[in-house]
Amino acid sequence: MFRWSRWRSVAVLCAVVMAVMTALLSPSATAATNAASSAPRDAAGVTVPAGVTAGVAVFDRQTGTFTEQLNPNMQFRSASVVKLLIALDYLWNRGPDYQIPSGDQAKWNSMLRSSDDDAASEFWVRNGEGSIVTRMARELSLSSNTTPPPANQDGMWGYTALTAADTVKIYRYLLDTSPARVRELIMGNLKQSTRCSATDHFDQHFGIAGAFNKPWAVKQGWSGFGDIEQGTCRPATSALNSKAASVDLTKPALHTTGTVGSGDRSIVAVYTLHDVGTSYGKAYTDLGRLTRSLNVPGGVRPAGTWFGTWSSGVNVRPEPNTTRDPLLQLPAGVEVLVGCQTRGETVSVPPYTNEWWAYLPQYGGYVSNIYMSSPDNQLPGVAQC
């Protein structure tokens, strides 16, 4: 720090100022300034819930800078995020029109939109398993932190190691370098992400999909929740289990990656691990809170108020009554966005009764307020529909 009391000469002071100006305008200083602009901001503003380990990178394509970085080079098992590399490898040598054979088209769409594991497994085996990751890491200039599954588990594509920083590189390639047809085939499907996954029926609209209004495109990932109670689009038919290895394959993993805003302005990659025994609903909520805390240029937050829920198997209904079949069930104990509330059928869960229903705009349906974590029948601060 300068101690101005030591400066007695105006001439000396002017000389120092001129020297500083010259240094700032030099090529080396310019390079340093550019490097600083790409460095992470203070991560103190990022909300990482207790019991969560996170790797985060948010890149603003308009300014060419990162707005968030937290453990960006930390390895996580990729779960379904590796389907981006499977898709890119599948298309790599199919130019110039990059046509997908009719027999593969439905599987291709389902793999990217609905995270279809069976489709991913077929393409994985057909195209060389772990060599897919090695090829794509080389072609996309990814870091040495992106690695195939362990040699004795080559068939487990979800055990591929990825980082938030390398995930940003994958999306930057798709958006800025890849042939237009490749971009259309992959990003076009990610923009049509379904709420329900295709094979294990998890509700996959967490993280980016819950924190921001459209337009967004997402490729999510989850693994390791096993037989723990989870809310689903319909009763689950399979479970995801993990075994220990050098990259943590034991803790439940939940990842959200993709783009947010008009023109895919921001690339967002959030990888998380949760304490063993964490329910899917809690992980879903914790990842949502973390994602909503991020500085994501171009992202528009949905209107409404977030409330916790309790109980498992809570139905989302098309109307504020139990007459019609439910649309789906909430992940157990998940936090939900409430747009408004209205009176409807009285629901009883002794010793409580409640005639008020919350409208959940992100699900397009209603849940009885009796299942909302609030002491009153009416939710505070929420308008009537």
Image: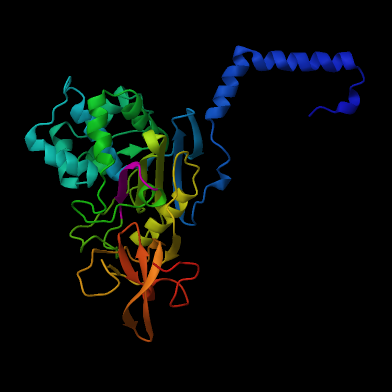
Question: How many numbered discs, if any?
Answer: 0
Q: Quadrant of the C terminus?
A: bottom left
- Left or right: 236, with 300 as reference point: left
Residue at the (22%, 33%) spot, across then down:
185
310, above or below 337, in the image? below
State the image coordinates of residue 33 (x, y, percent, origin top left).
59, 23
Please name whichever residue, 243 or 254, is drawn nearer the observer in this view of the structure: 254
Q: Quadrant of residue 129?
A: top left
State the image coordinates of residue 334 (x, y, percent, origin top left).
37, 63
State the image coordinates of residue 111 (x, y, percent, origin top left).
20, 42
- The main secondary structure of the magenta stretch is strand
Residues shaded magenta: 213-224
Residue at the (50%, 42%) spot, across then down:
295
Which residue is most to the bottom? 351
179, above or below 330, in the image? above
2, above or below 158, in the image? above
Q: Quadrant of residue 126?
A: top left
Is residue 218 a member of the stretch shown in magenta? yes
**Residue 325: in sight, yes or no?**
yes
Q: Quadrant of residue 285?
A: bottom left
Is residue 96 a member of the stretch shown in magenta? no
State the image coordinates of residue 317 (x, y, percent, origin top left).
27, 68
Please name whichever residue, 349 or 126, is drawn nearer the observer in this view of the structure: 349
Which residue is most to the front? 385
